[in-house]
Image: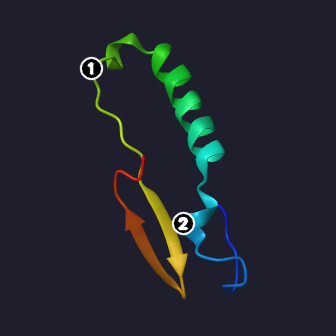
Amino acid sequence: MKSKSGTAFGDPLDMVGEEKVRRVRRAAEAWLARRPELAQMSVRFDVVVERAGRLSCVRAAF
């Protein structure tokens, strides 16, 4: 979880860049590789951001 106050740094969704996506995917792949019983599981990543005190969910963001 990451929090920023104000809009000086842009939209919070912009904080989920290519490198962060790559690292999360790699960690998930390693975790799933140790659990063969989950091999057929479909996986998606949602991203939740806060804008002006309101939460917004981007389903299947990557």
Left/right placement of residue 11 relative to residue 60 reads right
Regarding mark 2 in the picture, which secondary structure is present there? helix
Q: Are marks 1 and 2 in contact (CB under 8 Å)?
A: no
Residue at 65%, 43% in the rendered image:
19
> Which residue bears the numbered disc 1?
40
Regarding mark 1 in the picture, which secondary structure is present there? loop
Residue 13 x, y percent position in the rendering: 54, 66
Check the image and tell me how it is coloured.
Answer: rainbow
Q: Residues within 10 Å of mark 1 (few under 14, many from 20)?
A: few
Q: CA distance from mark 1 to mark 2?
A: 29 Å
Residue at 71%, 77% in the rendered image:
9
Q: Is residue 43 above or below residue 9?
A: above
Residue 5 x, y percent position in the rendering: 70, 82
Residue at 36%, 42% in the rendered image:
44
Q: Is residue 40 above or below residue 61?
A: above
Left/right placement of residue 6 relative to residue 28 reads right
Give the image quarter of residue 12: bottom right
The mark tally for this picture is 2
Give the image quarter of residue 57: bottom left
Q: Is residue 62 above or below residue 41?
A: below
> Which residue bears the numbered disc 2?
13
Q: Is residue 9 above or below residue 6?
A: above
